[in-house]
Image (tube, rainbow, N blue to C red):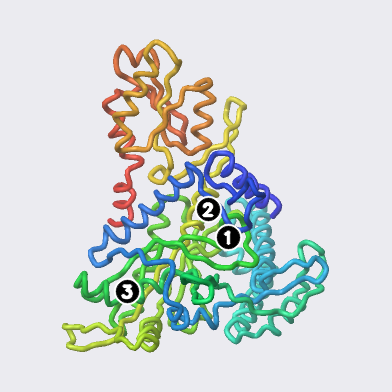
């Protein structure tokens, strides 16, 4: 576990050093759980957005986009249930004075048990060698089975407490498991209390005449309240979807694990409206489609797992999470939910306006059911970053740190490097940059030795380095270096576009999972 923590610390340090993520307001000692994205971070973030948008909106004729306002009428959040029930169960340690989410404390306890199972598997793999089968070992080993049984029992209790809002039960489970505060090392806990996560502010000309309003805690409601507007203006027929990328805000008391949990974050989500009775077919479709979207990035199929929910939110009749193996374990990356007709019916009730669709095929009006896919953009960013961070020992005895970001998502696609700062090489390099920059985000760099520049581009995650040397001036060929293999080949200048494009163009990535 300590190794995981060390790796994660290195990733965070690397993200800051190479312009991916900075602490918000760092000159003033920072603001907790708020981060700024640097020059390369914002490029990676935009590339992830672009990949998602093209796969959802551009590749589906029945999905359109929306960008709803952050500020919404306060009744919106009454209708959605957020005003009355958007709470986290919190508990304080009396000795350290630190506050924790009760469910997170229990989840961390489960993670420790899962880490023990992983250790058992590693030992077994060494013992049995080629005869080792992980699935068989997990399903037959007595010690592992006991641990799995314990995990299942804890999860069952926690889900029951969540469903019943049983705060006393939460505390009793924490005491039963003898969970201690990581700071004080004691289990001297307060009672568990609920804390509302909504950010409240005022809107109006003066404070006296102003009214309470909220920063949206989720983006979905902006789609629901615009259901009629979108349907009437686009004339789309059910089934159809509305996609949106936008900021959401939650007053997280216990924000943790870098950008995994923040007070201000971005969501990429799509609400898919379907005929009642057909929601389970579409739920399966979108669950499969979204998993393919992730796996197409080639970050390892074993990095993902599907977790079907046993305990459902009050508005859902099916739910599943796509979990990713972060350095701190498997955590939710994306959720797929069948939200029934709860949201539209609720807004219909509170607004007094019909949220119905007339289906000409069956000659009937109804409130559509909804399938939701929602992925945290910041979590996706962290998943890509943490997977891509690699420390390599080279045959020469040297080492390098490289970000093996999937090339279509890489902030820079190519770096153009003149071997020296003389003999017309900088001019030629800038000419090559000019020919590529409208299609690919490129960087010109001339400082330091060529080896140091290669290492710097490796650390940024640039898939290609193009070196301009004396030979280039004679025959218009350059040295093209691949980030991952570090192989170098001599190629003609006019072949650069096609070579780079095949590796970094999004269309090749999209085709790979849409076939």
- Residue 491 occupies which quadrant of the picture? top left
Q: Which mark is residue 341?
A: none
For marks 1 and 3, give the one nearer the viewer: 3
Q: Which mark is residue 382?
A: 2
Residue at (52, 20) in percent of width and height: 449
Q: Residue at x 62, y 62 (%)?
A: 255
On-image quarter of the C terminus: bottom left
Identify the residue at image location x=44%, y=28%. Answer: 487
Q: Residue 349: image x %, image y %?
A: 38, 89
Q: Which residue is mark 3?
A: 226
10 Å crowding of disc 1: few (<14), some (14-19), many (20+): few
| Residue pointed to by mark 1 | 134
Q: Nearer the viewer, mark 3 or mark 2?
A: 3
Q: Position of residue 24 (x, y in %)?
A: 58, 51
- 466 lies left or right of 195: left
Q: Nearer the viewer, residue 476 or 425?
A: 425
Left or right, 245 with reference to 274 = right
Above or below, 197 against 163 in this view is: above
């Amino acid at each position: 576990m300590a190794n995981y923590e060390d790796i994660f610390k290195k990733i965070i340090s690397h993200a800051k050093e190479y312009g991916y993520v900075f602490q918000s307001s760092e000159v003033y000692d920072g603001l907790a759980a708020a981060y700024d994205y640097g020059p390369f971070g914002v490029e990676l973030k935009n590339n992830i957005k672009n990949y998602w948008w093209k796969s959802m909106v551009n590749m589906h004729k029945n999905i359109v986009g929306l960008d709803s306002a952050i500020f919404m009428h306060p009744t919106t959040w009454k209708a959605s249930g957020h005003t009355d029930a958007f709470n986290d169960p919190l508990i304080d340690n009396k000795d350290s004075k630190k506050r924790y989410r009760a469910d997170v404390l229990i989840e961390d306890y489960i993670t420790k048990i899962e880490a023990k199972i992983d250790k058992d598997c590693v030992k077994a793999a060494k013992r049995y060698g080629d005869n080792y089968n992980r699935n068989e070992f997990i399903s037959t080993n007595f010690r592992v089975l006991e641990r799995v049984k314990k995990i299942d029992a804890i999860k069952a209790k926690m889900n029951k407490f969540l469903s019943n809002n049983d705060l006393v039960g939460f505390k009793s489970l924490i005491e039963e498991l003898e969970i201690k505060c990581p700071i004080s090392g004691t289990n001297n806990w307060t009672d568990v209390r609920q804390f509302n996560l909504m950010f409240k502010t005022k809107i109006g000309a003066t404070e006296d005449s102003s009214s309470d309003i909220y920063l949206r805690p989720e983006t979905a409601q902006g789609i629901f309240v615009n259901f009629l507007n979108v349907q009437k203006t686009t004339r789309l027929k059910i089934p159809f979807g509305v996609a949106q990328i936008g900021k959401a805000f939650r007053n997280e008391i216990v924000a943790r694990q870098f950008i995994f949990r923040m007070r201000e974050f971005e969501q990429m989500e799509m609400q898919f409206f379907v005929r009642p009775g057909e929601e389970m077919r579409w739920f399966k479709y979108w669950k499969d489609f979204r998993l393919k979207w992730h796996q197409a990035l080639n970050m390892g199929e074993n990095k993902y797992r599907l977790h079907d929910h046993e305990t459902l939110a009050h508005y859902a009749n099916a739910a599943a999470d796509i979990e990713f193996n972060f350095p701190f374990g498997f955590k939710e990356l994306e959720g797929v939910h069948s939200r029934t007709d709860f949201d539209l019916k609720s807004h219909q009730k509170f607004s007094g306006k019909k949220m119905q669709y007339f289906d000409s095929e069956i000659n009937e009006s109804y409130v559509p059911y909804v399938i939701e896919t929602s992925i945290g953009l910041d979590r996706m960013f962290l998943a890509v970053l943490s997977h891509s961070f690699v420390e390599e020992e080279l045959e020469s005895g040297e080492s390098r740190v490289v970000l093996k970001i999937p090339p279509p998502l890489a902030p820079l696609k190519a770096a153009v490097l003149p071997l020296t700062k003389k003999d017309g090489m900088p001019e030629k390099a800038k000419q090559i940059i000019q020919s590529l920059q409208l299609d690919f985000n490129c960087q010109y760099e001339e400082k330091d030795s060529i080896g140091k520049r290669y290492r710097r581009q490796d650390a940024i995650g640039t898939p290609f380095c193009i070196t301009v040397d004396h030979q280039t001036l004679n025959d218009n060929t350059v040295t093209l270096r691949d980030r991952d293999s570090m192989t170098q080949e001599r190629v003609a200048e006019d072949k650069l576009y096609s070579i780079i494009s095949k590796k970094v163009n999004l269309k090749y990535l999209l085709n790979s999972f849409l076939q």
